[in-house]
Amino acid sequence: MTDDTMNPDGTTTHFGFKTVDEREKAGLVHGVFTNVASKYDIMNDVMSVGIHRIWKDAMMDWLTPRDGQHLLDVAGGTGDIAFRFLERAPMAQCTVLDMTESMLLEGQKRAEAQRQSDKLDWIVGDAMVLPFEDNTFDRYTISFGIRNVTRIPDALSEAYRVLKPGGRLMVLEFSQLPNQGMQKLYDLYSFNVIPRMGQLIANDRDSYQYLVESIRKFPDQDTFANMIRDAGFSQVKYRNLSFGIAALHSGWKI
Amino acid sequence: MRDTEPNDQGQKADTPLDRRMLEALVCPLTHATLSYDAERNELVSKAAHLAYPIRGGIPIMLEEEARKLD
């Protein structure tokens, strides 16, 4: 990790391996997701050889959705997490928030096709300034989204604010492998294979190059757990998925 | 719960927001309540002097997308 992340005047941040002005990052990330929106679900399948589905199911296993709960899924894109939540708790209510309108439009279409529109709300918004009152939601999820947020502590504080007391945060994100050898192998794969696949399938190498770089920059499991504690959450725990290629972090607002 | 019928045909660009959604939203900058301008199909934050657009039934709660009010 370079000093740029912790720049005390807070004016720069990372866009993959590039250091950019903080004000630019949202726009750059927005560009990435606007570019990949229509093929995003397919790309996720191809890139992770379908493993992201297993990870998301593991997320649901730990989250245990219940009828009557109100979920806020941030960076929810096309609604992947929300639809899984509703599969397990058909009488739940889900609000999907994302910066990228075109992703939500894809999700909205899917909701209409599945006749689930009445259980889902779609809102364009920013994880760092959520358009909801305090103590609104029972569950907050963010899946492969937190590393794209410009100021991660701000997003975690907002998660804490909008959760009801007794509410729970769960984060699914790429993480770090526990040993150097495995990390090297994984880096070889991700830096060489994924951008090429992005080129082949979505005709967009740069966006996938960014995705890979941003994964490598994200803090390791324990560092991120401490960030969650710093936002006020209790009983913060994590579980590694596929040896730590990804991790689930859980915290409660007591 | 809802005062509008579920719409299987998909929402039109000018679909008004249902009331439940309006009640759940606040201004992201001030946390003040919003009022719904049905004519312009916007969510108005008097405190922030901003009007957030609604497109295709999706409220766009971003400062940079909002219309500034005098």
Image (spheres, coloured by chain):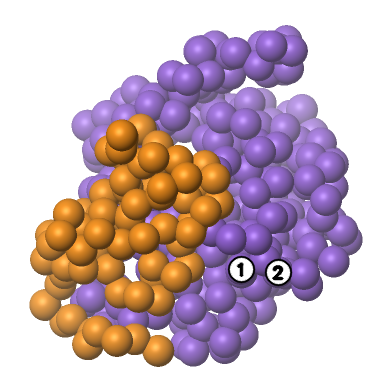
Chain colours: A purple, B orange
Q: Secondary structure at mark 1?
A: loop
Q: Which mark is residue A136?
A: 1
Q: Position of residue A252 (x, y in %)?
A: 79, 63
Mark 2–mark 1 CB contact (< 8 Å): yes
Image quadrant where residue A35 sits: top left
Q: Position of residue B33 (x, y in %)?
A: 48, 59
Identify the image quadrant of the C terminus of chain A: bottom right
Q: Which residue is mark 2?
A: A164
Asked if A233 appears above or below B70 in the picture, the reply is: below
Q: In the picture provided, is B6 more to the left or to the right than B50? A: left
- Give me the C-alpha separation between circle 2 and circle 1: 6 Å
Badge 2 crowding class, 10 Å Cα cut-off, few under 14, some 14 to 19, many 20 or more, is some
Q: Position of residue A84 (x, y in %)?
A: 48, 73
Letter of the chain that mark 1 sits on in the rendering: A
Q: Which mark is residue A25?
A: none
Q: Position of residue A43 (x, y in %)?
A: 34, 47
Between A114 and A149, the residue placed more toward the observer is A149
User: Same chain for the residues at labels 2 and 1, yes or no?
Assistant: yes
Asked if B16 appears above or below A144 in the picture, the reply is: below
